């Protein structure tokens, strides 16, 4: 286990204020808030003398790109610079020259989860140039193990994305160039471009975000026409049962996308109202289990305009949304859906740096098309911190084990876990229950007690850190089990859970309907999915 001791960092009122503004000002509407606001303010004011600060980052003695956070008097301080910056941090390549007012600063310097971040205090004194030299230590090299990272919710610009991908060690991060009310898609830039660090710049990502939630649309040769957002002045609105927010339905858009060969439709967050409908109709290729409400060092326990989580079951003031997201995912798996996990940070809209919520896909050597195929096959794990490499009986996540009549399967797990934050728990989850706790060993190895499998179902490995400011975790994609001597695992509880969910959505659409002549059209996919879950309930093999 590679990990470090806990850190006590200053919390920023400005960061909290900015995050609240995003949620209260943008998320109740149909669209995201503007990404132009900054969380920092210049210290002192006009006429205050500044001093030069030289910051250098290195890895193994060689200059390295890095991400830098500065705080002055406990508040984020963003220097005026031509460097790539976003709200509370700057990104630089090896060396940065900054002008800062005198004062005592705290700093954090990071380069994604594969490196151990550094933090400390520096004093800038009037009349004296200052310098900061930081050597970053690598925790693990996923690429050497055949794993390559992606972020499936990127609102940063196409101009900035290559440098950000290189800094954060991402190979896939499609830029969203089209969504409701915005079309920046450029056919001349539609072909994916190989970047010097080995990743791929893809400028064809799309997002459809409305009352039923949001889906991410990737690998389309042509963008789709999406409905304009409904607005009241600068406020975006969501009304159930209103054709202006409902039509064409999200299911229709997903179906149109999937008519294009190789298209990938990702459910942007678990608690969106139309999530069960889209999954039930087979329209979702990946499920963003690590999503943008999992923030860097800050909680976000709201579900925006999605379906509220059970507040009695999920009551933790920091972890509840994360725990609820995981539980929803398990309910789908309990119905037999093979649903790969994915991840997206929404950097450019939220404070997350690009790649904070990420998905690793195993391809051996990187190949862009192979990466997307591997993701669709579930050969992945998601993370916003710990790095979790797992094989079961030498097979990758997404594999289906088949047990012959009257037989059983001895499960041998190869688990490696590396984390900058201390680990709270590593667990083997089988059929939505924790059945074994892993024991942390040397060199990142995790040991589990022997397990015999004899029934159909699924299992995965998950880990959570001791970080208390946000839900920080990793999870493999599921492994599946099919036993010849038994029936497939279908949970009655899970079917009833999603029947109730869709029924609530249907009731709201009927109760709040703005155009009776188009109600049937709006309800059609909901009722189709409701019928599918009723059929699963009737076929249930477990409670």
Image (cartoon, helix red, strand yellow):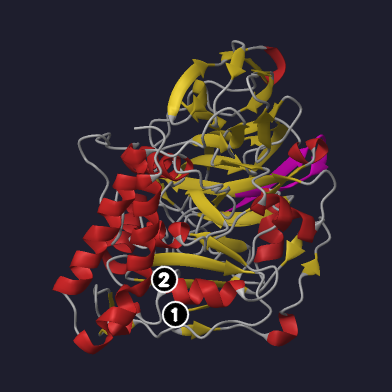
Asked if the magenta segment contains residue 422, the reply would be no
Which quadrant is home to the N terminus? top right
- Is 219 rendered above or below residue 430? below
Corner quadrant of residue 198: bottom right
Q: Distance between the residues labelled 2 and 1?
A: 7 Å
Query: For the view shown, which residue lies furthest in the left direction?
Result: 511
Give percent across and percent down for residue 223: 59, 81
Query: For the view shown, which residue lies furthest in the bottom direction?
Result: 517
Secondary structure of the residue carrying tag 1 is: loop
Give percent across and percent down for residue 23: 31, 60
Dot 1: few (<14), some (14–19), or many (≥20) neighbours within 10 Å?
A: some
| Residue 420 visible to the viewer | yes
Asked if the magenta segment contains residue 54, the reply would be yes
User: With 55 as the anchor, is 241 left or right in this view?
Assistant: left
User: With 439 as the anchor, is 390 left or right in this view?
Assistant: right
Which quadrant is home to the C terminus? top left
User: With 476 as the anchor, is 465 left or right in this view?
Assistant: left
Dot 2: few (<14), some (14–19), or many (≥20) neighbours within 10 Å?
A: many
Residue under circle 1? Answer: 180
Q: Nearer the viewer, residue 449 or 143?
A: 449
Provide the residue span drawn in magenta: 51-67
The secondary structure that most of the magenta stretch takes on is strand
Residue under circle 2? Answer: 209
- Is 33 rendered above or below residue 86? below
Secondary structure of the residue carrying tag 2 is: strand
Give percent across and percent down for residue 255: 53, 73
Q: Which of 335 and 420 is in front in this view?
A: 335
Corner quadrant of residue 62: top right
Q: Which of 238 and 103 is in front in this view?
A: 238
Whether tag 2 and tag 1 are in contact, CB under 8 A, the answer is yes
Give percent across and percent down for residue 67: 61, 49
State the residue at coordinates (62%, 76%): 259
């Amino acid at each position: 286990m590679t990990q470090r001791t806990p850190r006590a960092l200053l919390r920023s009122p400005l960061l909290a204020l900015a995050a609240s503004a995003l949620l209260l000002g943008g998320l109740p509407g149909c669209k995201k808030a503007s990404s132009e606001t900054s969380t920092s303010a210049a210290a002192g004011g006009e006429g205050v003398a500044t001093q030069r600060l030289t910051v250098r980052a290195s890895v193994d003695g060689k200059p390295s790109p890095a991400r830098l956070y500065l705080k002055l008097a406990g508040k984020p301080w963003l220097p005026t610079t031509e460097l790539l910056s976003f709200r509370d941090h700057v990104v630089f390549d090896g060396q940065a020259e900054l002008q800062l007012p005198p004062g005592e600063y705290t700093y954090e310097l990071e380069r994604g989860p594969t490196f151990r971040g550094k933090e400390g205090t520096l004093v800038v004194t009037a009349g004296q140039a200052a310098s900061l030299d930081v050597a970053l230590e690598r925790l693990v090299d996923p690429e050497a193990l055949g794993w390559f990272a992606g972020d499936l919710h990127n609102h940063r610009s196409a101009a900035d994305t290559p440098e950000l991908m290189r800094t954060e060690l991402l190979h896939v991060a499609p830029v969203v160039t089209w969504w409701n009310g915005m079309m920046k898609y450029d056919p001349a830039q539609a072909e994916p471009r190989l970047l010097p660090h080995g990743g791929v710049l893809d400028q064809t990502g799309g997002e459809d975000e409305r009352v039923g939630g949001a889906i991410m649309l990737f690998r389309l040769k042509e963008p789709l026409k999406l409905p304009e957002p409904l607005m009241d002045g600068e406020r975006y609105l969501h009304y159930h049962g209103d054709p202006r927010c409902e039509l064409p339905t999200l299911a229709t858009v997903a179906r149109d996308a999937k008519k294009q060969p190789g298209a990938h439709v990702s459910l942007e967050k678990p608690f969106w109202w139309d999530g069960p409908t889209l999954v039930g109709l087979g329209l979702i290729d990946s499920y963003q289990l690590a999503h943008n409400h999992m923030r860097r060092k800050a909680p976000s326990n709201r579900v925006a305009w999605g379906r509220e989580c059970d507040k009695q079951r999920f009551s933790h003031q920091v972890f509840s949304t994360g725990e609820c997201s995981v539980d929803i995912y398990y309910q789908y798996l309990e119905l037999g859906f093979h649903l790969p996990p994915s991840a997206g940070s929404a950097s450019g809209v939220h404070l997350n740096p690009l790649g904070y919520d990420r998905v690793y896909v195993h391809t051996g050597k990187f190949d862009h098309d192979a990466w997307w195929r591997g993701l669709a096959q579930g050969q992945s794990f998601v993370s916003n911190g710990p790095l979790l490499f797992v094989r079961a009986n030498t097979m990758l996540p997404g594999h289906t084990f088949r047990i012959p009549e009257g037989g059983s399967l001895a499960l041998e797990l190869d688990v490696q876990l590396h984390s900058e934050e201390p680990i709270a728990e590593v667990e083997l989850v089988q059929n939505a229950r924790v059945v074994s706790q892993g024991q942390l060993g040397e060199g990142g190895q995790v040991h589990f007690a022997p397990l015999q499998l004899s029934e159909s179902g699924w299992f995965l490995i998950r880990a959570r850190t001791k970080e208390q400011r946000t839900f920080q975790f990793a999870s493999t994609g599921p492994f599946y089990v099919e036993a010849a001597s038994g029936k497939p695992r279908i949970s009655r509880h899970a079917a009833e859970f999603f029947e109730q969910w869709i029924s609530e959505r249907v009731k709201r659409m009927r109760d709040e309907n703005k155009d009776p002549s188009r109600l049937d059209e709006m309800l059609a996919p909901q009722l189709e999915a409701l019928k599918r879950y009723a059929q699963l309930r009737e076929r249930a093999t477990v409670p």
